[in-house]
Amino acid sequence: MTIRFALVALLLLGACTSSAPDSLSEGTWTGTITPMNHPDRPSPITYEVRQATGGYQLTLQAGGGSGLAARDLTLQADTLAFTFNEPEAQVPLRCVLVAEPDGHYAGRCTDPGGQWARFTMHPPEAGS
């Protein structure tokens, strides 16, 4: 009985785990940014993803301002991490977004003082 239970558990675990993305689709990703102090006020944001030497180049665009270049971008297993400077205060925001089952990423970008905003990032539509 114990061996049968262990085999069933392993099979179920394998069926529930999704394969981690090993690349990002190039193009314009869309999403929202929702500040921690205004959870009822999501704002639209776009991300331009391009392949670059040694990885990816990511530029964020929100609120009609100029693009914000991300740095220290890593994609490991199902986690996308990057840093960019908040445009008004010029403080670094460290973002950690996790891949969701439907292919989009969601997570937080946090400043050095612990203030954060929730970010979502949806892949480009097919053919764009």
Image (tube, rainbow, N blue to C red):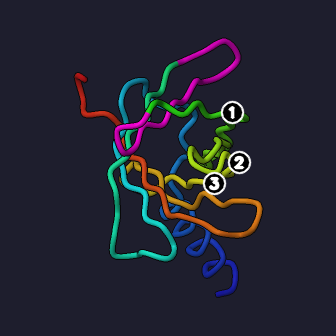
Q: Position of residue 121 (x, y in %)?
A: 42, 48
CA–CA distance in space, label 1 to label 2: 10 Å
For marks 1 and 2, the one nearer the N-term is: 1
Q: Secondary structure at mark 3?
A: strand
Decide which of 2, 89 is in the foreground and name it: 89
Circle 3 or circle 1, nearest the eye: 1
Q: Position of residue 4 (x, y in %)?
A: 61, 78
In the image, farthest residue toward the bottom: 1
Helix, strand or loop for the magenta stretch, by majority? strand
Kindly identify the residue that appears in the image at 64 percent across and 39 percent down.
75
Q: In the shown orientation, is residue 90 left or right of residue 113?
A: left
Kindly identify the residue that appears in the image at 47 percent across and 51 percent down.
105
Q: Secondary structure at mark 1?
A: strand
- Of the residues shown, which amino acid type is indicated by label 3? Val
In the image, farthest residue toward the front: 88
Q: Secondary structure at mark 2?
A: strand
Cβ atoms under marks 3 and 2 closer than 8 Å: no
Badge 3 is on which residue?
96
Badge 1 is on which residue?
71
Span colored in magenta = 51-65
Quarter holding the N terminus is bottom right
Quarter holding the C terminus is top left
Badge 2 is on which residue?
92
Decide which of 25, 77 is in the foreground and name it: 25
